[in-house]
Image (cartoon, grey):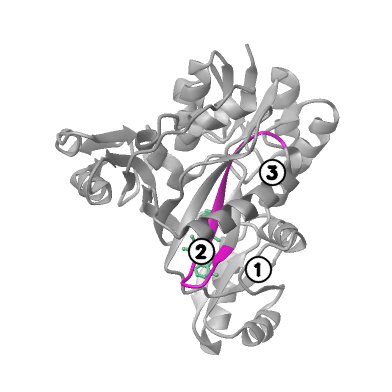
Amino acid sequence: MKKILLLGSGELGKEFVISAKRLGCYVVACDSYAGAPAMQVADECSVFSMLDEAALRAAIAQHQPDLIVPEIEAIRTEVLLEVEKEGFEVIPSARAANLTMNRDRIRDVAVGLGVRTAKFSYAESAEELMSQAKAIGFPVVIKPVMSSSGKGQSVAKTEADIQTSWDYACEGMRGDRRRVIVEEFIHFEFEITLLTIRQRNGNTVFCQPIGHVQERGDYQYSWQPQPMKPEYLKAAEQMAEKVTSDLGGAGLFGVEFFVTKDEVIFSELSPRPHDTGMVTLISQNLSEFDLHARAILGLPIPNIDTVEGASAVVLATKEGVSPTFTGVADAMSEPGTDVRIFGKPTTRPYRRMAVALAKGENALERARAAAKKITVVTQ
Ligand SMILES: Nc1ncnc2c1ncn2[C@@H]1O[C@H](COP(=O)(O)OP(=O)(O)OP(=O)(O)O)[C@@H](O)[C@H]1O
Ligand SMILES: [Mg+2]
């Protein structure tokens, strides 16, 4: 039986724990607060900040896991690099966790591999941002190099927006580097997540592309399969294979692309299950969490069967504790529709609390309708 130390215990971690438990693993779920979703289904839990170097090192030393599985980006990844050298196994690799924690590092890797990205540059001050934005051409997208879920991200349409964008990025920054990436705004037709699985004993395999829509930097709904030209899908798969094989290790990656009329552009990737991939809880025979678990345990993935499916998020509207949900029965009343409630102990505006899932014809419409029926209620 493998012992897994899960770093981050959100809703993605929770589904991963369920998948890993079904395969007989022992899981210690870690996060900075008690009662996090994955802790509710794990064997043990541990509460500490994953950015706290000493605490992270102590947890690894205490639990002696066979596999360290990061669920979030905000981890003191230098510790992972060190413990990997000592013989601990990090999923998919300490290097992958380290590089993807910073947008500039993974972007530089992609460019080094000859992968097509949006035009971009970096800036460390408002003045530098202005000159880089002018060189790229407005509108531009500005993101802190260390942040996630759209924090600190904005679009500057003209020079007049640059100072506001710089200030907003500084507010949303994590870590100690005042650095932003400034990117050409891509007028994409749609964007996709290509779930890519590196196996221990087998080829890299891909799920059908997942289309999604983002607001405020967070995904709102996703669907699978996203129809696309076969040659564009092939191009995306080739780029995904290139980047993930450079990162190495075994596991599932969420590789994000923009698709325009003319081409496919690499955006970023997560070396772990992706939030837009929650649709696979209903659309595939093996969900992205099952696939991650199989890949890291070295178990075979002989087939991935897909039906049309969709997911739509249920968000909280205000701050509160001990949320309850109304409308769940109504949302679930239609055949082929399901709901996952994450069990987060507290709410805040726009916090993702649950997801509605649908499969079959018009799955997207039905998932969105189901999500709308659910209301998060707090005292
Ligand atoms: N250059 C761009 N042109 C157009 N839209 C963009 C661009 N960069 C980002 N976006 C939009 O913003 C969304 C979020 O950006 P991105 O994926 O880079 O960061 P993030 O979502 O904060 O990171 P994470 O996926 O780790 O949460 C994208 O999915 C896309 O909809
Ligand atoms: Mg993203």
Residue 323 percent location from the top left of the image:
30, 37
Residue 329 percent location from the top left of the image:
16, 33
Label 1: few (<14), some (14–19) or many (≥20) C-alpha neighbours in 10 Å: many
Q: Amino acid at mark 1?
A: Val
**Count of marks overlaid on the render:** 3
Quarter of the picture holding the C terminus: top left
C-beta proximity under 8 Å, tags 2 and 1: no
Q: Amino acid at mark 3?
A: Ala
Residue carrying label 1: 180
Above or below, 258 against 40 in this view is: below
Residue carrying label 2: 258
**Which is more N-terminal, label 1 or label 2?**
1
Quarter of the picture holding the N terminus: top right
131 vs 315, left or right, is: right
Pick the front one: 76 or 305: 305
Above or below, 376 against 106 in this view is: above
Between the C-alphas of marks 2 and 3, the distance is 23 Å
Q: Nearer the viewer, mark 1 or mark 3?
A: 3
Between the C-alphas of marks 2 and 1, the distance is 20 Å
Residue 200 percent location from the top left of the image:
68, 29
Start-end of magenta stretch = 249-265
Q: Determine if the C-beta at disc 1 is less than 8 A from ligand 1.
A: no
Q: Nearer the viewer, mark 2 or mark 1?
A: 2
Q: Residue at x 22, y 43 (%)?
A: 374
Residue carrying label 3: 97
Q: Amino acid at mark 2?
A: Phe
Q: Determine if the C-beta at disc 2 is less than 8 A from ligand 1.
A: yes
| Residue 260 located within the stretch drawn in magenta | yes
**Which is more N-terminal, label 3 or label 1?**
3
